[in-house]
Image (spheres, grey):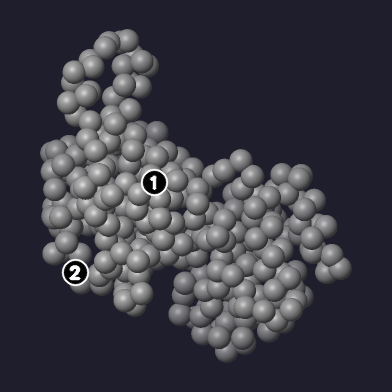
Amino acid sequence: MNYPAAATELLKTGVLPHELVFARSLQSSNLDAGAPDPQLAEADVAFGQPNPNALLDLPKLKWVHLTSAGYERYDRADLRSAFQSRGTILTNSSSVYDEPCAEHALAMMMALARRLPDAWERQRTDHAWPAAAIRANCHLLVGQTAMILGYGAIARRLIELLTPMRMKLMAIRRAPTGKEVVPTYGENEIERLLPEADHVVNLLPGGMVTGKFMNASRLALMKSSAILYNIGRGSTVDEEALLSALREKRIAGAYLDVTAKEPLPSEHPLWTTANCYITPHTAGGHQDEFERLMLHFLANLRRFNSSEPLNDRII
């Protein structure tokens, strides 16, 4: 990716005395997969979003560090097998994005609880003063139930932020360990528990296993007063089913930071569906995002050089 000059300089200085080689084709976003690059064959370490297929047969490559928290395009059986057979390490940047994504989720939960979008709409349009109606629709988070889908770094940080709100918190994950700090259940329990949730916060990664995880039948189990938040991947929600649930007022609202297709087409009905609030995949963004990405990678590089365990290791 073409990083800002300050972040690029930080990287150039920090990797010394190692040689730094830039990909021949740089992406515009650190979420996009790069094109195959023959230079990878000579690399010991890859930093960014290297093309997954290009990583299958690179015996010299010892470590791949992703510039994103998500890693679904690399979560493949053939890649895992290749990495494990060669002893290649895969790490991501969850430690960079857990705080902003958790704060983003909390901000939207609080904004909707206090009906801030309703007031902003009046300011933007007719300058009306419907104080009584807005006050009557506000609610307190205290005592409400939040179900968090996933238990990765973002989920754990969100739990820390929500705990002082005195909410009832629970999580759903593929394989609970019993060491989680809130009651945590396997995916086979979600249908039983969904009717209890006032807030369903989807932090699931993309991939075949999680495709349309929140489908029509699961959306139908939510309270009519409940809100769905998606800060994971757009592919994990059945958007047609979500549109129907919103239009028929079977759920109270949805907040989407991610969509199945990005950018979301301007004509897509989600843009104009009542009680659907959209941010353009900005949950992970923050002022010093790229500098923090570099510092996270460089800290792991020092660990790699010293044969210490790497942070945010996936494989």
Q: Nearer the viewer, residue 150 or 19?
A: 150
Residue at horizontal 57 percent and vertical 43 percent from the top: 286
Separation of marks 1 and 2 at Cα, in angstroms: 23 Å
Which picture quadrant has residue 169? bottom left
Name the residue that disc number 2 marks. Answer: 189
Q: Residue 258, which numbered label?
A: none
Helix, strand or loop under label 1 = helix
**Side (left or right) of 201 relative to 47:** left
Name the residue that disc number 1 marks. Answer: 105
Pinpoint residue 188: horizontal percent, then vertical percent: 20, 72
Pinpoint residue 261: horizontal percent, then vertical percent: 40, 48
Which picture quadrant has residue 243? top left
Residue at horizontal 56 percent and vertical 65 percent from the top: 92
**Side (left or right) of 264 relative to 79:** left
* Label 2 crowd bin: few (<14), some (14–19), many (20+), radius 10 Å: few
Pinpoint residue 155: horizontal percent, then vertical percent: 39, 59
Helix, strand or loop under label 2 = helix
Instruction: Identify the amino acid type marked 2.
Output: Glu
